[in-house]
Amino acid sequence: MMTFEGKVAAITGAGSGIGRALALGLASKGCSVCVSDINEAELAETVALLAPYNVKVRSDPLDVTDRNAVESLAASVVDQFGKVDFVFNNAGVALIDRVETVSYDDFEWLMNINFWGMVYGSKAFLPYFQQQGQGRIINVSSLFGLVAVPGQSAYNASKFAIRGFTDAMGQELKGTGIYATSVHPGGIKTNIVKNARFINPGSKHIQKSDMETRFAKMARTTADQAADVILKAVTRKKKRVLIGGDARFLDVVQRLMPEKYPEFLSFVLK
Ligand SMILES: NC(=O)c1ccc[n+]([C@@H]2O[C@H](COP(=O)([O-])OP(=O)(O)OC[C@H]3O[C@@H](n4cnc5c(N)ncnc54)[C@H](O)[C@@H]3O)[C@@H](O)[C@H]2O)c1
């Protein structure tokens, strides 16, 4: 089975949550890591946490919506390390609003990060993987890339799109030694809700702080557990990874009741 020892991984959104846990998990397995994030202070904390590991660590402030910056980073990583084995397109944000009220500014903010950031990361690293004849592109979608919920149309659109893009790319790459993986976490205890834009949830009684409290109760999987599942799936060349009992259960519900699942989901989410 493939191991991470002596490999090189680039991880976006590594200043917090799943991205940070991936960086630490990879480093603990002997993989050099190139961590990047738009939030420089949190990125510095990740770098400090990586200090005990005996691997090379590279850290770059990076906004994944800046296509040139993503392309330069990929080139510079290969220049410095002589190769790259994995890219984890993980950076992402959430937005709670309804279709009739969501502003194009907010919608584009989210799509630029979640969707275009993932496309830029995939396309920037792909030529190097092709030159090497091997590589892995791991794109972090969501349970909400499998089921849709009211108030999250923009997030759903971005995460369904990641799944479609990654599945199509994986099929194009068949036989090349390059694999694409679409990752679908359920609720993971991270800063995703804290960092979300929360505009108009459709109820006057729900505030962002209530949502944070609710999410903290609902999200049962830790970022470390999520990273562990992702890294195991990468070694097994899995095309799709579901993380957490909630994601696995709701995936089945959605398959069994493709039209009725929203009623079930709204009951569960109450
Ligand atoms: N936490 C969950 O329940 C959950 C569930 C499903 C999917 N996800 C996905 O997992 C991924 C990681 O999220 P998380 O839960 O760890 O959240 P998080 O908020 O803890 O971490 C996200 C990181 O992305 C960074 N980021 C935001 N905008 C960026 C940009 N423009 N450029 C570069 N970095 C940027 C943030 O600074 C942050 O460090 C996201 O794609 C998210 O949509 C999370």
Image (cartoon, rainbow, N blue to C red):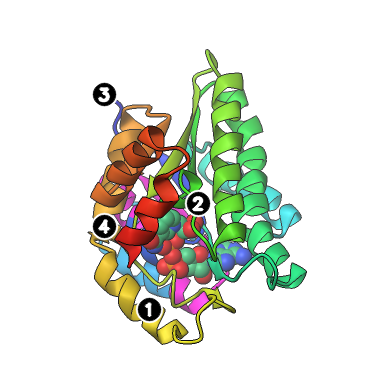
Residue 221 falls inside the magenta stretch: no
Q: Which residue is mark 4?
A: 224
Upstream in the sequence, badge 1 or badge 3? 3
Queried on whether the Cβ of the residue with tag 2 lies below 8 angstroms from ligand 1, the answer reads: no
**Residue at left 30%, top 59%?**
268
Left or right: residue 59 compared with residue 236: right
For residue 148, which numbered disc appears in the image? 2
Which circle, 1 or 3, is nearer the viewer? Answer: 1
Q: Position of residue 186 (x, y in %)?
A: 35, 53
**Residue at left 72%, top 59%?**
66
Foreground pick, 89 / 207: 207
Foreground pick, 79 / 240: 240
Contact check, label 4 and label 1, Cβ < 8 Å: no
**Residue at left 40%, top 86%?**
209
How busy is the neighbourhood of tag 2: few (under 14 within 10 Å), some, or many (20 plus)?
some
Which circle, 3 or 4, is nearer the viewer? Answer: 4
Q: Which residue is mark 3?
A: 1
Cα–Cα gap, marks 1 and 3:
40 Å
Upstream in the sequence, badge 4 or badge 2? 2
Cα–Cα gap, marks 3 and 4:
22 Å
Upstream in the sequence, badge 3 or badge 4? 3
Q: Position of residue 45 (x, y in %)?
A: 39, 74
Cα–Cα gap, marks 1 and 2:
20 Å
Which circle, 1 or 2, is nearer the viewer? Answer: 2
Q: Which residue is mark 1?
A: 212
Region rendered in magenta: 22-43
Upstream in the sequence, badge 1 or badge 2? 2
Q: Which quadrant is home to the C terminus?
A: bottom left
**Residue at left 38%, top 27%?**
237
Q: Secondary structure at mark 4?
A: helix
